[in-house]
């Protein structure tokens, strides 16, 4: 599992899934590998609130079964965050080229807007932070009012704390309910809300 990070990314957006996936490795007989990756050169990333995270791996979706894209900086059109990533074009371009059989691309919070810029949410059920819902719809996404929206190889989650639900759902989906319950007990956190899936 790869979590894409970039300057201005919301810290909880990328640390919550990292912790859930890492904890899942203790509840799966096959183990789980989770890494932070960047589309640029491996480097230190500065998060939205000034934290520093050393990223040592480059973008390699062919080596992952799940890619998670966080959000951050939606309200700042200038400076680091999703708008800078969209303007640069590298991450949206990499995402547009990434889909393949067996790869799940996911986002949380305003990371869905980056997926939208890559053309991945057009015509598909998806969700994002409530403050960015109109933008996601303008990009062609079919907005669903749910904390997590699972459309097969595209899984999106709402605002910042929903990264916990996104990761717990993916653990349950990919590793089974026992692994998900084990992680919930370990973190002393129970997933909120109903996961939307196509009927």
Image: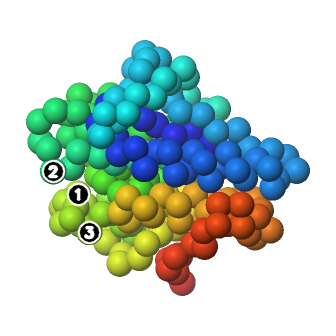
Residue furthest to the front in view is: 188
Q: In the rendered structure, find residue 139 and report the number of the disc placed on it.
A: 1
As drawn, 138 above or below 114: below
Is tag 2's residue or tag 3's residue first in the polypeptide sequence?
2
For marks 2 and 1 on the same chain, the one whose residue lies earlier in the sequence? 2
From the top left corner, tell me how far across and down residue 141 is, in percent. Answer: 30, 64
Task: Tell me if 84 is positioned left or right of 192 in this view.
Answer: left
Task: Report if residue 166 is visible in the image.
Answer: yes
Q: Quadrant of residue 89?
A: top left
Quadrant where the image shows the N terminus:
top right
Q: Nearer the viewer, residue 41 or 99?
A: 41
Q: Residue at x 67, y 45 (%)?
A: 22
Residues under labels 2 and 1: Cα distance? 17 Å
Specify the label residue 75 is tagged with. 2
- Give the number of the mark in front: 2 or 1: 2
Quadrant into which the C terminus falls: bottom right
Q: Which of pointers 3 and 1 lies earlier in the amino acid sequence?
A: 3
Which residue is found at the position 43% from the left and 50% from the top? Answer: 12
Numbered disc in front, either 3 or 1: 3
Look at the picture and state if 43 lies above or below 189. Answer: above
Q: Which residue is mark 3?
A: 130
Q: Secondary structure at mark 1?
A: loop
Residue 71 percent location from the top left of the image: 34, 48
């Amino acid at each position: 599992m790869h979590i894409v990070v970039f300057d201005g990314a919301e810290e909880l957006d990328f640390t919550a899934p990292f912790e859930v996936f890492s904890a899942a490795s203790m509840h799966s007989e096959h183990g789980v590998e989770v890494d932070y990756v960047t589309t640029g050169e491996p480097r230190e990333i500065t998060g939205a609130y000034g934290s520093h995270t050393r990223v040592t791996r480059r973008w390699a979706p062919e080596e992952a079964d799940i890619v998670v894209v966080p959000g951050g900086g939606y309200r700042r059109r200038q400076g680091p965050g999703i708008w800078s990533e969209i303007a640069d074009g590298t991450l949206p371009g990499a995402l547009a080229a990434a889909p393949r059989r067996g790869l799940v691309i996911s986002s949380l919070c305003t990371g869905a807007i980056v997926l939208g810029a890559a053309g991945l949410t057009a015509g598909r059920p998806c969700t994002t932070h409530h403050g960015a819902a109109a933008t996601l719809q303008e990009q062609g996404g079919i907005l669903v009012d749910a904390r997590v929206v699972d459309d097969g190889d595209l899984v999106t989650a709402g605002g910042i704390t929903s990264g916990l639900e996104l990761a717990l759902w993916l653990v349950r989906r990919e590793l089974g309910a026992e692994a998900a319950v084990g992680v919930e007990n370990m973190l002393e956190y129970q997933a909120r809300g109903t996961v939307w899936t196509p009927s």
